[in-house]
Image (tube, helix red, strand yellow):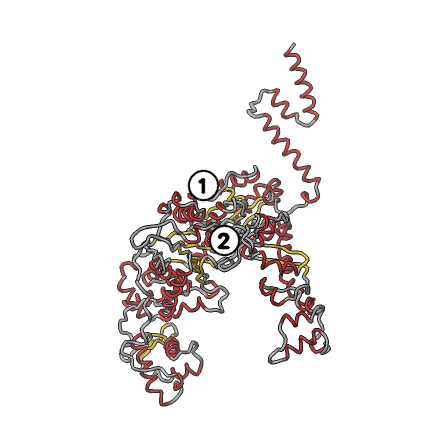
């Protein structure tokens, strides 16, 4: 009975399956074929059978071609960028069209009164009074103004010039009473700030603990620390901005994201993880409590680090030089570092380039109370506090012990774009959180641990991948690329934003060759086309990623061809990267790291007077007499001293040095002509078309190599380079790359193609001169 019932069910199921087109599966089952997972095989076959007609039924899917869609995205990006570029001039054009010509306004009109005041050598009207007399014109003339709350109260009359919108930035640092006046001058307000960062500084400000007669205010009557706190407490609608763009390495924001933002910040992974973005430098410093409140050893370590970094960056083109800043925990340490930096700048005037006011981002040294809003590529953080001269370490860390001390730490550790170097005289294990309840101190301990040990100090942080693939599509792509020999990882990143697949560079550990994005749930989760197809990719490319995209439609239709296309792109990227590394700039000697607890000089020495001349120089350069005939004997002696000290050297180098000795930054044609006319007393050699000047009677003599000394390589005579070749002949002769080995021996930091050509020519010349 039971068997007959099962047979009837089978017959009914068989008929239904046959009518549905599953006759092959029915026959296989009836013939006893071994199908270990018939249900899964059926599901896969059914989906494959269903997918093609379903795609053909949709015009968008049926006509999809990846090259057309990629071209459409590229056009959208170009138009979106053009729109952004044109917006500002278009706004200016419209505003200008709405204003009359300057000479077309009557004298007794609002704009006429303004024109009259502008024409006076000493205006007679205060700005506030002038604006008060322009109730109709001011908004047309200045529809958007950038002012501090204090300036608003000082210059804009109350009840006039009401703006459609008032926006506060860094609102956590604006007190409520300072903000009210600006809010009253607008119809709407947007308050932008970070409640996890610094509140307003209140050294001499008011408090709201009580009334004038001494009665304590009710809790609801007390002012909040800032207008940001005030509006948040009032229940005004809030939007959270989660995308974090500053840090070029996720490690720079990982600590704050974990401790202060509950992991909610969306950060972007870096394509190169070979360098530690956050690094701890331990020094044997002593904190001078009391009036000094400084750590001199720590300060000197920081200044020494700055000097070496800036000196190394001078070799880079000006546009490629990084920016640098220093943060201290108090103003006394800030002042000490500034004094030491002043001495270092006097000792090496070349460093002035980094401090010049015309730089967009000159070197800054600030304390934690006034650093908010600033950022630099490389930041140095002086912890300052440490053991006293007797070796005792108290748990008093200044503002870190106060309420909100953790806010100061949050600001300090999030100012760097590329690198954060922490200089400390104590370790995390020396901070005893049992002796203080301050959250700021506990967080400082955790941060020092993070700077020392890295990602393992944060329990929620992963080493680069947050887990398995998110879809079978991504899994299939990953497995197919791995079968081609690529090392592929899934879900690259440590926050809410992750790259679907990352392909490791086969030659360089820690470097990603490319990211592969699939159009899965993460791609479609973006709310707008700009986020999805422009901003995300632009940010990733700015961090060094090459992004390849695989469209699911292509993969489902032609997986083999799609895989080959991506494999070809990866091979091309690898070939280009290898060529770029070999030809453009081969790094052969990184700058030396600061040894931990290294002995540091007690002070930065000042440059000796007349350091540009040899010892015993008697000639005093006189720029006022430079072109006078009676100055010729002094100029000849000056040139002789330079050639004796620095020869052989090119003619242009001599002219440059003579110009600098006279205080001139440039060598013009007249100066060059004057110096060239007096070179008859020197011998010379011609090397690669460059005329090198020698002391009389010494041309061609052996010359000791004097080091690079920031000289351009082609300013160094091959006779001087020959001394290095001869001294290290065995080492160079057995090197796989003789030119590269010679560069190492000379201390060249980067070997460009031109430098390689010049050193190879010197090697060939020296070999020929021996035979």
Direction from residue 711 to residue 220 in the image, left or right: right
Q: Residue at x 51, y 54 (%)?
A: 198
The picture quadrant where one finds residue 345 is: bottom left
Location of residue 455 with respect to 627 vertically, above or below: above
Q: Nearer the viewer, mark 2 or mark 1?
A: 1
Apparent side of residue 276 relative to residue 51 in the rendered image (left or right): left
Where 218 sits versus 654, above or below? Answer: above
Could you tell me residue 333's position as x and y percent?
39, 60
Number of the label disc, if any, that sits on residue 448: none
Return the residue found at the far front: 213
Q: Is residue 648 visible?
A: no
Q: Position of residue 318 (x, y in %)?
A: 46, 66
In-front residue for pair 383/263 = 383
Q: Which residue sits at x=57%, y=22%?
A: 33
Instruction: Tell which of 72 and 390 is nearer to you.
Output: 390
Which of the 4 image quarters holds residue 382? bottom left
Q: Secondary structure at mark 2?
A: loop
**Residue beneath disc 1:** 459
Image quarter where the N terminus lies is top right
Point out residue 182 in the picture as x, y percentages from the top left corner: 62, 60
Q: CA distance from mark 2 to mark 1?
A: 21 Å
Regarding residue 379, the answer to whether it shows in the image is yes
Q: Quadrant of the C terminus?
A: bottom left
Tag shown at residue 247: 2
637 or 616, which is in the foreground? Answer: 616
């Amino acid at each position: 009975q039971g068997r007959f019932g099962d047979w009837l069910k089978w017959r009914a199921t068989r008929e239904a399956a046959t009518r549905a087109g599953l006759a092959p599966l029915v026959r296989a089952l009836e013939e006893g074929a071994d199908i270990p997972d018939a249900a899964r095989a059926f599901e896969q076959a059914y989906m494959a059978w269903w997918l093609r007609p379903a795609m053909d039924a949709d015009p968008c899917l049926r006509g999809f071609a990846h090259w057309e869609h990629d071209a459409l995205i590229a056009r959208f990006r170009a138009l979106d960028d053009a729109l952004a570029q044109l917006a500002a001039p278009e706004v200016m054009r419209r505003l200008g069209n709405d204003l009359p010509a300057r000479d077309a306004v009557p004298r007794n009109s609002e704009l006429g009164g303004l024109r009259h005041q502008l024409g006076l050598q000493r205006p007679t009207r205060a700005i506030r009074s002038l604006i008060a007399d322009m109730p109709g014109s001011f908004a047309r003339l200045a529809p958007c103004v950038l002012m501090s709350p204090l300036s608003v109260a000082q210059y804009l009359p109350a009840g006039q010039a009401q703006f459609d919108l008032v926006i506060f930035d860094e609102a956590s640092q604006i007190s409520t009473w300072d903000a009210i006046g600006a809010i009253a001058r607008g119809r709407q307000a947007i308050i932008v700030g970070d409640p996890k960062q610094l509140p307003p500084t209140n050294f001499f400000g008011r408090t709201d603990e009580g009334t004038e007669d001494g009665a304590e205010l009710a809790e609801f009557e007390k002012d909040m620390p800032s207008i940001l706190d005030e509006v948040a407490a009032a229940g005004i609608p809030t939007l959270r901005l989660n995308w974090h763009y500053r840090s070029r390495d996720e490690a720079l924001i990982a600590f704050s994201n974990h401790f202060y933002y509950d992991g909610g910040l969306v950060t972007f992974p870096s394509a190169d993880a070979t360098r530690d973005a956050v690094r701890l430098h331990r020094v044997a410093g002593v904190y001078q409590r009391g009036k000094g409140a400084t750590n001199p050893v720590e300060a000197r370590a920081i200044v020494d680090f700055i000097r070496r970094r800036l000196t190394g960056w001078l070799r880079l083109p000006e546009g490629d030089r990084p920016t640098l800043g220093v943060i201290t925990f108090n103003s006394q340490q800030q002042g000490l570092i500034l004094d030491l930096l002043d001495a270092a700048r006097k000792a090496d005037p070349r460093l002035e380039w980094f401090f010049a006011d015309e730089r967009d981002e000159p070197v800054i040294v600030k304390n934690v109370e006034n650093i908010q809003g600033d950022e630099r590529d490389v930041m140095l953080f002086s912890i300052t506090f440490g053991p006293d001269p007797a070796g005792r370490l108290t748990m008093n860390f200044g503002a870190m012990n106060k309420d909100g001390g953790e806010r100061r730490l949050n600001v300090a550790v999030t100012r760097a774009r590329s690198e954060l170097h922490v200089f400390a005289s104590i370790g995390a294990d020396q901070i005893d959180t049992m002796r203080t309840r301050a959250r700021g101190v506990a967080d400082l301990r955790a941060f020092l641990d993070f700077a020392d040990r890295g990602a393992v100090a944060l329990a929620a942080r992963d080493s680069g991948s947050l887990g398995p693939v998110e879809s079978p599509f991504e899994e299939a792509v990953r497995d197919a690329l791995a079968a081609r020999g690529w090392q592929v990882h899934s879900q690259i990143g440590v926050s809410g934003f992750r790259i679907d697949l990352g392909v490791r560079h086969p030659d360089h550990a820690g470097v990603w060759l490319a990211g592969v994005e699939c159009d899965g749930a993460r791609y479609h989760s973006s709310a707008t086309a700009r986020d999805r197809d422009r901003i995300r990719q632009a940010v990733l490319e700015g961090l060094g990623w090459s992004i390849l995209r695989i469209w699911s439609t292509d993969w489902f239709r032609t997986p083999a061809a799609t895989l080959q296309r991506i494999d070809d792109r990866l091979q091309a990227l690898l070939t280009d990267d290898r060529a770029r590394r070999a030809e453009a700039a081969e790094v052969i000697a990184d700058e030396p790291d600061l040894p931990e607890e290294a002995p540091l000089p007690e002070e930065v020495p000042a440059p000796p007077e007349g350091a540009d001349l040899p010892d015993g120089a008697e000639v005093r350069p006189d720029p006022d007499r430079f072109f006078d005939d009676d100055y010729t004997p002094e100029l000849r002696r000056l040139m002789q001293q330079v050639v004796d000290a620095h020869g052989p050297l090119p003619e242009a180098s001599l002219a440059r040095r003579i110009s600098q000795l006279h205080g001139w930054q440039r060598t013009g044609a007249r100066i060059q002509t004057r110096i060239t006319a007096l070179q008859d007393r020197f011998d010379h050699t011609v090397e690669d078309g460059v005329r090198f000047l020698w002391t009389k009677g010494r041309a061609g003599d052996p010359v000791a190599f004097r080091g690079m000394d920031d000289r351009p390589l082609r300013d160094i005579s091959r006779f001087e380079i020959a001394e290095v070749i001869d001294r290290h002949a065995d080492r160079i002769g057995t090197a796989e790359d003789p030119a590269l080995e010679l560069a190492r021996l000379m201390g060249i930091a980067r070997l460009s193609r031109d430098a390689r050509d010049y050193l190879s020519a010197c090697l060939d010349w020296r070999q020929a001169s021996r035979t």
